[in-house]
Image: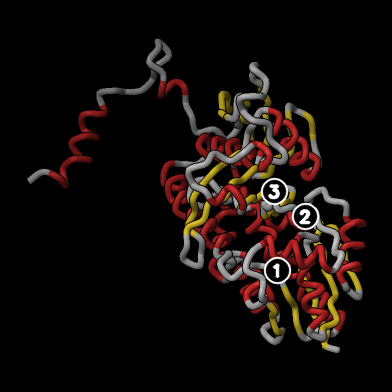
Amino acid sequence: MKKVVLAYSGGLDTSCIVRWLKERGYEVICFVADLGQGENFEAIEKRALAAGASKVYIRDLQEEFIKDFIIPALKANAVYEGKYLLATALGRPLIAKYLVQIAHKEKAPAVAHGCTGKGNDQVRLEVAVGILDPRLEILAPVREWEFKSRDEEIEYALKYNIPIDVTKKKPYSIDRNIWGISIEAGVLENLEQEPPEDAYLITKSPTQSASYPRYMEVTFTRGVPVKIDGKVFKIKNLINYLNEAGGQFGVGRSDMVENRLVGIKSREIYEAPAATILYTAHKELEALVLDRELAHFKEIISLKYAELVYYGLWFSALKDALDGFVNKTQKFVSGTIKLRLSKGTCVAVGRKSNHSLYKKELSTYGKEDKFDQKLAEGFIKLWGMPYKR
């Protein structure tokens, strides 16, 4: 019997896949990555075994996920198309890494995933696996099986007594980790309809959040968040704390029609309170400490970095090279940003850093002004000279 290691989430698709592959003569070994999704992994293991898996690997990868994937993306200010903070996209190369490791350990010639043929995750996983071990066969049952809808998958799961959490009434496809939640399918496919509140998991509706704002200070050292309101946190605890705090004020929701890598547009909603808070604070701190040319050029790099993550090219040479540039820019990104959380918004309202390039005596219009305004005339003449005919 041929072994295959399946990236197993415990959701509808991968639960059906276990049974589907077993019916076709495969021994299915499931791999479950704990990226901070807060699920009952004992129940997930039982579900995989009930579906027909011969073995289940569960790995707590939260620390590695944060250190090697989230923090580099935060330092890069990586956001896809202005809204998506890449939570799901960042988790895929790490999952691929362990799929390959377990396949080697089990001497399995193949790995499998539950991604659809029209999604981005198939690309992210398969490209990463192909880079790490091009000899492995990759199976993608959802691209070839007989089911034409999630309703049919639900019926299949019920037929074989596979325990699932999804229902026909609430058929959302959800991917969650410590950095954020991606939600699609169901009523969300109607672009004219506002996402219903039951689609959201960790954020209150901005209209139902507290009427008063909350202020907090986030402190960074070389681009890495280390304190909230002066209190030192371990990075995992810091992110969890901000997810809770931001969620109470409806911070971190986004509703977007995005351009998928495969060429179609899709409607996704996201929840990322901690990511939104930290991105806002980090970007504001960079505005304070980076010089103009470096700040402007980094905007270009941030856009490219986000594209590489979204496109599944985490292990590419270009992304590795960009990390070198990004890390260089973080030398002086240390300081504290004061934020106001209110009714779904996160806004910087205060800034301080020992590396600040802001000079009040040059920017003020008060009596402390030391800027020699007479110099402006010569500057303007020189600046405009190439454009005069």
- Which amino acid type is marked by label 3? Lys
Q: What residue lies at 58% left-to-right and 64% top-to-bottom?
A: 120
For marks 2 and 3, the one nearer the N-term is 2
Secondary structure found at label 3: loop
For the N terminus, give its image quadrant: bottom right
Q: Which of 55 and 317 is in front in this view?
A: 55
Instruction: Judge the density around disc 1: few (<14), some (14-19), many (≥20) Cα neighbours within 10 Å.
Output: many
Q: What residue lies at 84% left-to-right and 85% top-to-bottom?
A: 107
Q: Position of residue 290 (x, y in %)?
A: 50, 41
Instruction: Judge the density around disc 2: few (<14), some (14-19), many (≥20) Cα neighbours within 10 Å.
Output: many
For marks 3 and 1, the one nearer the N-term is 1
Residue corresponding to mark 1:
114
In the picture, measured across the screen, residue 19 lies left or right of residue 135, that is right
Taking the image as drawn, is residue 235 in sight? yes
Measured Cα–Cα span from mark 2 to mark 1: 17 Å
**Image quadrant of residue 214?**
top right
- Image vertical order of residue 244 relative to residue 182, above or below: above
- Image vertical order of residue 175 relative to residue 149, above or below: above
Residue corresponding to mark 2:
35
Instruction: Judge the density around disc 3: few (<14), some (14-19), many (≥20) Cα neighbours within 10 Å.
Output: few
**Image quadrant of residue 5?**
bottom right
Q: What residue lies at 58% left-to-right and 41% top-to-bottom?
A: 195
Residue 272: image tag = none
- Image vertical order of residue 93 relative to residue 388, above or below: below
Q: Position of residue 88 (x, y in %)?
A: 66, 56
- Which amino acid type is marked by label 1? Gly
For marks 2 and 1, the one nearer the N-term is 2
Q: Nearer the viewer, residue 297 or 307?
A: 307
Secondary structure found at label 2: loop
Nearer to us: label 3 or label 1: 3
In the picture, measured across the screen, residue 243 lies left or right of residue 237, that is left
Residue 170: image tag = 3
